[in-house]
Amino acid sequence: MVYRRTPAVQARLDAQRAAVLAAATALLSEHGYAACSVAAVAQRAGIATGSVYRSFPTKAELVAELFREVVGREVAAVRAAAAFEGDLAAQVASVIGTFAGRALRAPRLAFALLAEPVDPEVDAERLVFRLAFRDLIAGLIAEGVAAGRLPPQDPQLTAAALVGAVGEALVGPLADGGPAEQLVPALSVFALRALGHPMPPVAAAPPPVGPASAAPGTTAATTSTAPPPPLPPEPTDE
């Protein structure tokens, strides 16, 4: 006679699986893949090591499922950004800003998703992750080309190049925690240039506020806060 799990048993197993993934996600966010051993995940989840193996027969399967779950949230966030109502420049800025901004707010997790050495099974999921972002951006590019807002180009190729370039630009700040305040807007500008989109006017940045902005012999209170003159337009390639 074939054993069939009762609803109560299945619910308990599902809850245990969810607890395992939640514990693994926390460890991944804090310490990367190296910390996601089965024993460490079990301890974090408050269950026996054997209980983890009942949900995931191997560590590779656990980490691959963890990767899919975490990446699913990131893809959903970027897909929502791609649905932004606005012109192409605003849409691209929304997508790039969401992708890069979320990465910089959770650098350890983002580094694990983008660049940390992993098992082949997880590396295969990483490729799926990159392709999902490529396809989102390719859809925007195809719409821009069809509407005449972008020059003719191969949307898939351009999108793949953008995803690779943005990911590479993020690896350094994610790995060493270096300054990245201007990285997101810079990546948006880079993406628009790569697409061949006419650049919007450059807005002048306000001067720094506080004692550091005061000229020698003055105080911050007496220093003018008038914005600097606008930057001249950048030369175009003839």
Image: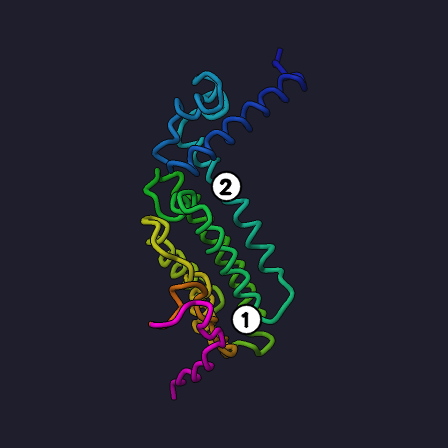
Task: Give the magenta part as a residue range.
Answer: 217-238
Q: Judge whether 25 appears above or below 151 on screen.
A: above
Figure quadrant of residue 182: bottom left
Figure quadrant of residue 64: top left
* Residue contact at pointers 2 and 1, CB within 8 angstroms: no
From the viewer's side, name the closer residue of 141 and 92.
92
| Residue 93 visible (yes or no) | yes
Q: Judge whether 55 appears above or below 169 on screen.
A: above
Going by the numbered disc 1, the residue's amino acid type is Ala
Q: Residue at x 37, y 50 (%)?
A: 174
Task: Choose the circle earlier in sequence order: 2 or 1.
Answer: 2
Going by the numbered disc 2, the residue's amino acid type is Val
Q: Which residue is drawn at 49% across and 60% down?
A: 96
Callout 2: few (<14), some (14-19), or many (20+) C-alpha neighbours within 10 Å?
some
Tell me, for residue 89, which label it has, or none: 1
Q: Position of residue 175 (x, y in %)?
A: 33, 48
Quadrant in which the C terminus is drawn: bottom left
Q: Where is residue 138 in the image (x, y as percent from the top left)?
A: 52, 63
The span from disc 2 to disc 1 (Cα, nearest Å) is: 28 Å
Type of secondary structure dominating the magenta stretch: loop
Residue farthest to the bottom, as pictured: 238
Q: Where is residue 1 in the image (x, y as percent from the top left)?
A: 62, 10
Asked if the magenta segment contains residue 65, the reply would be: no
Q: Judge whether 69 appears above or below 143 on screen.
A: above
The residue to which callout 2 is attached is 70
| Residue 152 visible (yes or no) | no
Q: Is mark 1 on a helix, strand or loop?
A: helix
Callout 1: few (<14), some (14-19), or many (20+) C-alpha neighbours within 10 Å?
some
Figure quadrant of residue 73: top right
Q: Residue at x 39, y 85 (%)?
A: 235
